[in-house]
Amino acid sequence: MTKNTGIVLGVIGALIVVTGIVFIVTKSTYQTSPSTVTVTDNSTPVQGNNSGSDSSDNSGTAAAQKAGAPIAVTNATVYPTDTTAILTGMVTPNGAFTNYWYEYSTTQNLGSRSADQLLGSGYYNLSAPAYITGLTKNTTYYFRLVAQNQFDKSQGTIYSFRTTSGVSAPEGSAPTVRTVSVSDISDTGATLNGEVTPNKADTKFWFEYGQNADMGNSTIAASTGVGSTKLSKSVVIGNLAANTTYYYRINAQNQFGTVNGSVQTFKTAGPSTSAPSAKTNDATSIKTTSAQLNGVLSANGKITTYWFEYSTDSQFSAALLSRTDQLTIGTDAKNVVVKSTAENLKSKTTYYFRLVSENEIGTVKGDRQSFKTK
């Protein structure tokens, strides 16, 4: 037997950039419980039956960003006592909320099943521990990790372990978490808040967040220690979009399992938005059949389309109205000088024109100006 005095949860953070948003992937290795245990490491699987690969790499490399079935990777290393066992593995949700569980039995038929546990929905690898109780002493058990989302189910490789004799079950339980309201909201960042109770086992916590209920982004996992006191935890996030609603929750995990806080929302701040401005300036480069129409406009926080209207009718009646091609300016555009050419004009004729700007808030028309062709 191997004697160990503590539980160590090693977390290696792998940084991934996906679709312009940075998120962190964790790779975890569980070691022994506080009790003396026998660690069974079956390097050869009993039976191959997995849709992914039981490689130990789990580097967190992002998959193609198309939601699909999860990947379940069973870990061959088990931490048994006389009547319990800590099983570990890795799950990649692949873009949809994913549940995981372990199938186990004294035969390879795997007739028993642990409780379902919910992981995130991103494209990164997550540890998937489970604590199995009610086992028989000195007995060989077979097990595998299974993960499922809305697209399909994935089964890891089947491995085996053997319970010991005279070793007590580890102390502690799965952590308790609560998602708390966001603070320090700006147009590009916020502080995510939550509460975690480790429940006497080495516990890690992280936040998920995103622009829809699937979230998909994650902060790096951080330790809360092994105590039994409720702790307040916060993480500052950035690179957010202004004036945008975000979903978020806190999650925590120790050797006894994974727990999720409630999903809540917040909205980032941002510049005030309104209808665009439009100012018509004098025409220039006036020729026999053409003229350059000029103006100044501001987008006022929204993507804005603009064009010039021109006509021989001072009232801009529809029957005689012409207009230049529509062009676009970005949300931050302010006092931008714009110009377009009016063509196919009649010589020695007075024309009236004005700048028009439009965004989702409204349409604004500048003052009327005029010119006479040569």
Image: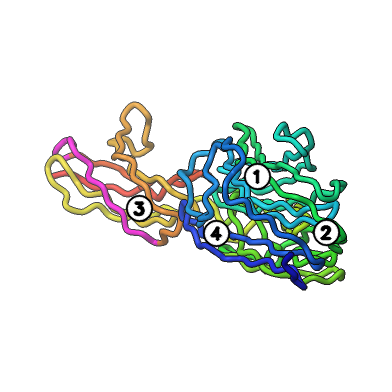
From the viewer's perspective, is the residue at label 4 or at label 1 nearer? 1
Residue at point 39%, 61% (across, down): 335
**Other-residue count near label 2 (Cα within 10 Å), few / some / many at <14 / 14–19 / ≥20:** some
The first of marks 1 and 3 along the sequence is 1
Q: Is residue 237 left or right of residue 291?
A: right
Q: Is residue 12 left or right of residue 279?
A: right
Name the residue that disc number 1 marks.
Answer: 159
Tell me which corner region of the image, top left, top right, bottom left or bottom right, holds residue 173.
Answer: bottom right
Q: Position of residue 278 (x, y in %)?
A: 41, 52
Q: Is 337 a magenta residue?
A: yes
Q: CA distance from mark 3 to mark 4?
A: 46 Å
Q: Position of residue 139 (x, y in %)?
A: 80, 46
**Amino acid type, label 3:** Thr
The quadrant of the rendering that contains the N terminus is bottom right
Query: What stretch of residues is rendered in magenta?
Result: 335-348
**Amino acid type, label 4:** Phe
From the viewer's perspective, is the residue at label 1 or at label 2 nearer? 1
Residue at point 40%, 50% (across, down): 367
Q: Position of residue 93 (x, y in %)?
A: 60, 44
Name the residue that disc number 3 marks.
Answer: 280
